[in-house]
Image (cartoon, rainbow, N blue to C red):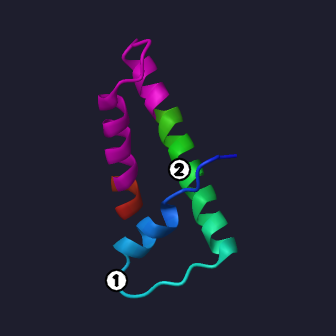
């Protein structure tokens, strides 16, 4: 596990409109969903890099995949 406590709870509270109470179970679920999203983003960025026959995952691979995933989530 992480040695340093995450700042996820404070980030959610700062972005929320109004006062938000987050229970311990909910915080764990949010962290799990965040990790799953980042894992899938990394896998798709790796696939994108392999399509371009690149041995390294570069920032533009991650940006392209993140843009694609966000479009899919909104639409």
Q: Residue at x 31, y 37 (%)?
A: 64
Q: Residue at x 51, y 68 (%)?
A: 9
Mark 1 touching mark 2, by CB under 8 A?
no
Q: Earlier in the sequence, mark 1 or mark 2?
A: 1
Can residue 37 be found in the magenta stretch? no
Number of labelled discs? 2
Can residue 57 be found in the magenta stretch? yes
Q: Main secondary structure of the magenta part?
A: helix
Judge the density around disc 2: few (<14), some (14-19), many (≥20) Cα neighbours within 10 Å.
Answer: few
The part of the image, by quadrant, that contains residue 25 is: bottom right
The one nearer the camera, 55 or 10, is 10
Q: Position of residue 20 (x, y in %)?
A: 47, 84
* Residue extent of the magenta highlight: 45-70
The residue to which callout 1 is attached is 17
Assign the C terminus to one quadrant of the image.
Answer: bottom left
Judge the density around disc 1: few (<14), some (14-19), many (≥20) Cα neighbours within 10 Å.
Answer: few
Q: Residue at x 59, y 59 (%)?
A: 31
Q: Residue furthest front?
A: 4
The residue to which callout 2 is attached is 37
Left/right placement of residue 15 relative to residue 24 reads left
Q: What kind of element bears circle 2?
A: helix
Q: Would you place residue 17 above or below residue 53 in this image?
A: below
The part of the image, by quadrant, that contains residue 60 is: top left
């Amino acid at each position: 596990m992480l040695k340093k406590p995450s700042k996820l709870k404070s980030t959610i509270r700062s972005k929320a409109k109004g006062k938000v109470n987050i229970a311990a179970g909910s915080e764990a679920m949010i962290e799990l969903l965040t990790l799953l999203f980042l894992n899938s983003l990394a896998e798709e960025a790796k696939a994108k890099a392999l399509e371009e026959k690149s041995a390294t995952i570069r920032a533009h691979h991650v940006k392209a995949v993140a843009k694609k995933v966000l479009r899919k989530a909104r639409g």
